[in-house]
Image (cartoon, rainbow, N blue to C red):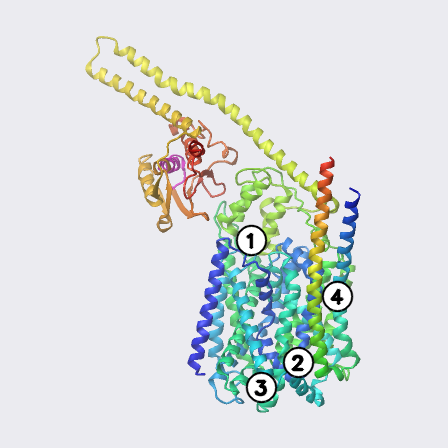
């Protein structure tokens, strides 16, 4: 019994940290896309800029994909843990 | 490629689109929505963002300004990185309130104000019209590329003919699949599926062209990069940081605020979970669409004449290289991009125009319907939408004709983006800040709109002069910055110094904390006021959908039948569902007019707010338990009411049956007594014998009925199951029933074609039911002239549904649950002249046949619905015997 609430806490802790990551990601994306252009517009306007932008873009897509998958799993784990506890509680009653 | 072949191919493609949309609508109507609801379809439908402006204009944009074109796709990508908490939240709140458009969202948030919605609609229409014109122009230009041989002297506005044909075809498509029905949620499966297919076509076309350009015309990616690097001296290609930032911002705003994007992203979404796939898949789609833009632009500049139109490089490059099939594929891709954008944009605008302009105007101007006047609001709304679709398309075409086409496609798209971005502060503020209020929204959006009109829109059509800006600052970026800053400041300032009214505060709470507070209403509880609401809902949704909604609400409360209790929860849900068809403001006003005003005071609001807060904190289990408890209590209440009524009825039954048996018995005895007297004339003897015979017959009939009923009730009735045709049965029933009160001439309204439904059942028993119901209508219908309408529908599982409706005064609500009981005669027995067993027998027969007979309230007369399964169920004891 005492293990279960611990698991819930760990699952929901992880879920919350992933939520934080989801909030930071847009800020990070905006910085990656804006800063080089403000910093050295002449250099990023041609071939290297194209490589940088499309590279960043691909990385962002992969990051969103990984994050959403992790969030889905974390949500499912939290839900499962909560349901297990509720069931244990019912049995105890 | 010959022009005729092009037109033929294009027509075949259009026919395919019509077919796909038709098939998807059919599948949805049959309840097969699983593949239609797939996240991939949703993601692909988001690609209406890539209009013809993307398809043709992006390359032109890139050849003029280099990498700057990418802002239009990077902005949405940044927004989608926040899909998990941002967009999901938006979709959840919008679905909770059944929002139909961006104007509806703003209006619902700020106290269901229709004036605000009408204003946002105005902005959307002004911003989108040039954008629609742009799509028509691009299709007509692409046709001209094939029609003329020269690459350079393509007229900007070729004859309006092509554009007119395209506009007409698109209007037809949109009206056919966009205004098919007025669903309670504003979703269009046919349209969405067709644009998902178009999304694949345009992506494939663009990728094929890109591969051809990079590996066919150039020498692979490394060579391509070297060619781009050679452009290093071009001053037009140097990125301007202020412009870069401003464009990223407005394109990010556009992905939620453009009417068509709001339509596919929010309104057509089944739930917010779609976004966990679309969150990465849509940026990936944009990435794929942008990847080859720069290479195509560079190769176009190198290989084509200097004065060739860069907006048409995607077509002229493959045509120049003799790749006719590739050119045709690219043409189809561009055609797809333009048509899908126009269709969705027109649907979104038409919804807004009909819900926020035409509908309120009409409700204000028309005279109040008298009594139970079956006013058909659904027809009005649908026609209003059709009219709006035609109007939007016509204005778009006229705009294209009047301006003669513009040289740069990109400028027009940006005008639309910046216009709709003015709605963004009010939208985001409304979702995040409870203090935001209507005055702030009006002020902010109004000022932003005025500045946009003066500094961006009017200069774009050649009226007025652009803003004088400080040297070194980009004029467009400056105008965007200025209008959005003034907009936001006015929104915040006016919100801080204003006090919202209670409705608005309640909506603010609901939007910001994504909870679902219920409407607080002073309407008396009870079901006698529900029927007017049902009548109203029927006017909007049609009889079938309205009944289904009311039945499911009643079932949720644990009640049987079609009339739920008038609980706050029910009223809230009804209003939200109506809002899904006609907009929040109108739905609110209509419910108030029927169910009585809900004057919300501040103390009510406090109560509701604390309730909502508490409900949020309660655990799910407790909530479920409470709902369950309430349901059980209602069921018990209903059972108890019925038991009491039945007990009274049982006593009445015993009294009644003794009376019914005694009356003929008494006369039989009395007349047999008389017959025994010897000095009786033959004539008298005959007369008395006949009376005895008739009375004995009446006794037998009564006993037959009772026996029949008890056999049916015990489930031991012998059924002779045969195939039967409903049309014949109804025909026979009508002629058999015409003997009852033959002096009354009924007008019978039937739909002969729909009646040819073959079913397997006991035809004689079913006939008995039909005769009984029709005879009842003939007996009790008191209207002048009497009308009887019979409607047959095939149900989803292959059974049949027969509605028999007269136009009399119907049965009052309190008695509706008793009419199927034994000896329940509603009017005076003398007039009816039956024992009152008819409907009880009907109910038992239908139960034996595996169907049911129910009373339909709110149909403007007595109405019965007979539901039949495709075949009767196998009796339980038959299976047991075999075992």
Q: Position of residue B123 (x, y in %)?
A: 63, 68
Which mark is in front, 1 or 3? 3
Classify mark 4: helix, strand or loop. Answer: helix
Left/right placement of residue B247 relative to residue B855 reads: right
Which chain letter goes with mark 1?
B
Disc 1 to disc 3, how far (Cα)?
53 Å
Q: Which mark is residue B217?
A: 3
Residue A25 tag number: 4
Q: Nearer the viewer, residue B319 or B536?
A: B319
Are dots 4 and 2 in contact, CB under 8 Å?
Answer: no
The quarter in which the N terminus of chain A is drawn is: top right
Disc 3 from disc 4: Cα separation: 38 Å
| Mark 2 or 3, nearer chain start | 3
The answer to the question of whether label 2 and label 3 lie on touching residues, with beta carbons closer than 8 A, is no
Label 3: chain? B
Instruction: Classify B121 as above or below B691.
Output: below
Query: Outermost residue, front direction?
Result: B883
In the image, residue B811 lies in the stretch drawn in magenta? no
């Amino acid at each position: 019994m005492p293990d279960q609430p611990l698991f819930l806490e760990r699952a929901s802790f992880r879920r919350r940290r992933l939520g934080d990551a989801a909030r930071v990601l847009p800020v990070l994306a905006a910085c990656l896309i804006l800063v080089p252009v403000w910093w050295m517009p002449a250099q990023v306007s041609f071939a290297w800029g194209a490589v940088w932008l499309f590279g960043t873009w691909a990385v962002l897509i992969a990051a969103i994909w990984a994050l959403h998958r992790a969030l889905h799993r974390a949500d499912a784990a939290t839900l499962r843990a909560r349901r297990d506890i509720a069931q244990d509680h019912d049995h105890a009653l | 490629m010959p022009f005729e072949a092009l037109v033929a191919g294009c027509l075949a493609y259009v026919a395919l689109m019509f077919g796909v949309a038709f098939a998807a609508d059919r599948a949805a109507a049959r309840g097969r929505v699983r593949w239609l609801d797939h996240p991939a379809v949703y993601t692909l439908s988001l690609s209406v963002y890539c209009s013809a402006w993307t398809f043709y204009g992006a390359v032109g944009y890139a050849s003029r300004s280099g990498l700057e074109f990418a802002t239009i796709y990077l902005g949405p990508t940044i927004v989608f990185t926040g899909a998990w908490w941002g967009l999901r939240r938006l979709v959840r709140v919008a679905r909770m309130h059944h929002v139909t458009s961006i104007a509806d969202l703003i209006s619902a948030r700020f106290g269901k104000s229709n004036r605000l919605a009408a204003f946002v609609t105005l902005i959307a229409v002004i911003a989108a019209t040039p954008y629609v014109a742009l799509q028509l122009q691009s299709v007509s230009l692409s046709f001209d590329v094939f029609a003329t041989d020269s690459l350079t002297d393509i007229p900007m506005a070729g004859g309006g003919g092509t554009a007119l044909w395209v506009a007409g075809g698109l209007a037809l498509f949109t009206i056919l699949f966009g205004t098919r029905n007025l669903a309670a949620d504003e979703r269009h499966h046919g349209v969405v599926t067709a644009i998902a297919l178009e999304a694949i076509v345009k992506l494939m076309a663009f990728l094929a062209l890109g591969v051809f350009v990079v590996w066919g015309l150039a020498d692979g990616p490394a060579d391509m990069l070297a060619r781009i690097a050679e452009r290093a001296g071009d001053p037009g290609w140097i990125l301007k940081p202020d412009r870069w930032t401003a464009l990223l911002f407005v394109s990010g705003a556009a992905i939620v605020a453009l009417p068509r994007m709001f339509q596919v992203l929010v309104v057509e979404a089944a739930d917010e979970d779609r976004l966990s796939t679309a969150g990465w898949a849509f940026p990936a789609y944009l990435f794929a669409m942008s990847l080859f833009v720069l290479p195509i632009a560079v190769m176009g500049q190198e290989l084509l004449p200097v004065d060739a139109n860069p907006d048409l490089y995607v077509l002229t490059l493959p045509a120049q290289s003799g790749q006719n099939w590739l050119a045709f594929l690219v043409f189809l891709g561009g055609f797809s991009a333009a048509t899908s954008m126009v269709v969705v944009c027109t649907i979104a605008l038409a919804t807004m125009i009909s819900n926020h302009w035409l509908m309120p105007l009409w409700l204000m101007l028309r005279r109040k319907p008298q009594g139970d006047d079956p006013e058909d609001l659904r027809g009005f709304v649908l026609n209003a939408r059709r009219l709006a679709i035609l109007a939007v398309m016509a204005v778009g075409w006229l705009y294209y004709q009047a301006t003669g086409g513009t040289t740069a496609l990109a400028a027009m798209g940006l005008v639309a983006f910046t216009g709709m971005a003015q709605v963004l502060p009010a939208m985001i503020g409304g979702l995040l800040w409870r203090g935001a209020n209507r005055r702030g929204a009006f002020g902010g959006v109004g000022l932003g709109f005025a500045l946009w009109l003066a500094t961006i829109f009017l200069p774009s059509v050649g009226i007025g002069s652009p803003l004088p800006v400080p040297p070194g600052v980009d004029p467009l970026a400056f105008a965007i910055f200025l209008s959005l800053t003034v907009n936001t400041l006015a929104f915040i300032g006016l919100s801080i110094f204003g006090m919202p009214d209670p409705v608005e505060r309640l909506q603010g709470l609901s939007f910001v904390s994504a909870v679902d507070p219920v409407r607080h209403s002073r309407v008396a509880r009870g079901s006698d006021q529900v029927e007017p609401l049902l009548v109203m809902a029927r006017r909007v949704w049609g009889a079938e959908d309205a009944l289904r909604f009311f039945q499911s609400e009643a079932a949720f409360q644990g009640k049987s039948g079609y009339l739920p209790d008038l609980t706050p929860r029910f009223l809230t849900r009804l209003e939200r569902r109506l809002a899904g068809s006609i907009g929040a403001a109108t739905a609110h006003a209509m419910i108030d007019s029927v169910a009585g005003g809900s004057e919300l005071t501040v103390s009510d609001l406090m109560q509701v707010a604390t309730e909502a807060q508490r409900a949020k904190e309660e655990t799910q289990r407790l909530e479920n338990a409470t709902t369950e408890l309430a349901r059980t209590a209602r069921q018990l209440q209903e059972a108890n009411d019925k038991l009491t009524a039945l007990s009274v009825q049982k006593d009445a039954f015993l009294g009644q049956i003794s009376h019914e048996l005694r009356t003929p018995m008494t006369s039989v005895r009395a007349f047999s007594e008389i017959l025994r007297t010897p000095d009786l004339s033959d004539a008298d003897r005959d007369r008395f014998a006949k009376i005895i015979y008739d009375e004995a017959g009446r006794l037998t009939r009564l006993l037959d009925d009772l026996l029949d009923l008890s056999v049916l009730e015990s489930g031991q009735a012998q059924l002779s199951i045969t195939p039967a045709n409903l049309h014949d049965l109804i025909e026979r029933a009508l002629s058999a029933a015409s003997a009852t009160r033959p002096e009354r001439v009924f007008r019978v309204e039937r739909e002969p074609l729909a009646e040819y439904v073959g079913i397997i059942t006991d035809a004689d028993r079913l006939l008995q039911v039909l005769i009984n119901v029709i005879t009842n209508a003939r007996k009790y219908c008191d209207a002048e002239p009497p009308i009887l309408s019979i409607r047959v529908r095939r149900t989803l599982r292959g059974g049949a549904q027969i509605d028999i409706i007269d136009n009399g005064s119907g049965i009052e609500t309190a008695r509706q649950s008793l009419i199927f009981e034994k000896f329940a005669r509603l009017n005076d027995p003398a007039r009816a002249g039956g024992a009152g067993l008819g409907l009880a027998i009907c109910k038992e027969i239908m139960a034996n046949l595996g169907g049911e007979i129910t009373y339909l309230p709110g149909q403007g007369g007595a109405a019965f619905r007979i539901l039949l399964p495709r075949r009767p169920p196998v009796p339980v004891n038959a299976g047991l015997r075999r075992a």
